[in-house]
Amino acid sequence: MSNMSQRQEKILRAVVEEYAEVASPVGSQLLAKIFDVSSATIRSEMAELEKLGYIKQPHTSAGRIPTDKGYRYYVNQTAEADEKPRATGGTRALTARIGQGSVPEQTIKNTVDTLVELTQNLGVATIGNQVYMSGLSNLFGQPEFINSQQVKEVAKLLDNLEPWLREAAPNKPLSVYIGKENPIGRTAGCSLIISKFRSPYSDKSFIGVLGPTRQSYKEVMNLVENAGQMLEDALYA
């Protein structure tokens, strides 16, 4: 159980969401405006969150960014709050594109390509024993991946993704692996968000996205879960 107060929970949520939006560390002044309290109040709450290991201060900045632990807390809260995937503009775009594939392989590829456009992440899906990938330039275009060592780690993760998925076969409709939770490329600073679906190739087919840990999780989790469900419906319609 977390020993976080309600206000700290809200501040952590704001740090995650603001950082996803602007890609630079979130300062106390911005949060003071959002919550309409003094910067000093925010600073002491942030110091507490930092002590608990949910946020950290990058050495060159006065602002804070979430840690893997902070993201995990946020993702768990999001998953609990949103029992059912929601229909959004993005899910409507998915519906339109999924229907355009004439063969299963094309249907799956269309869905991945649409996820890439909607999330600005790398999209992946298993088609038989292959992994179809799209959007590499999106992934490496993110400000996080300027560092070549990190890019190597991401590449390692991608190289091993297919055998790992086959072996681990995550069983939930939606699985989220954040940063160090990834089985390979643990220091890549990536999150893998995947959905399991049934396809003519395998009952354990997967579709999802890989992007930096700095994500709009709520939106992306919703899109990926919807993609898995819609694909299965389309393939067995």
Image: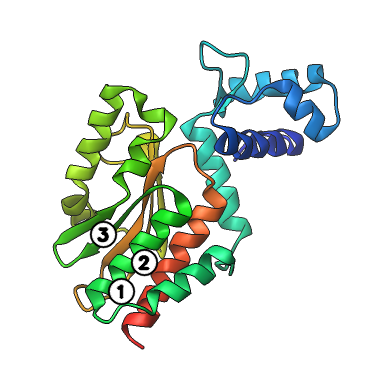
Question: Which amino acid type corresponds to the residue marked 2 in the rendered image?
Answer: Thr
The residue tagged 2 is 111
Residue depicted at 25% across the width and 77% down the height:
104
Q: In which quarter of the image is residue 152?
A: top left
Front residue of this view, candidates 139 and 227: 139
The residue tagged 3 is 169
Residue depicted at 59% across the width and 38% down the height:
21
The residue tagged 1 is 107
Asked if 101 appears above or below 166 in the picture, the reply is below
Mark 2 in CB contact with mark 1 (< 8 angstroms) = yes
Label 3 crowding class (10 Å Cα cut-off): few <14, some 14-19, many 20+?
Answer: few
Question: Which amino acid type corresponds to the residue marked 1 in the rendered image?
Answer: Thr
State the image coordinates of residue 176 (x, y, percent, origin top left): 42, 50
- Disc on the earlier residue, 3 or 1: 1
State the image coordinates of residue 218 (x, y, percent, origin top left): 56, 52
* Residue 48 in sight from this viewpoint: yes
- Disc on the earlier residue, 2 or 3: 2
Q: In this view, does 145 lie to the left or right of 21?
A: left
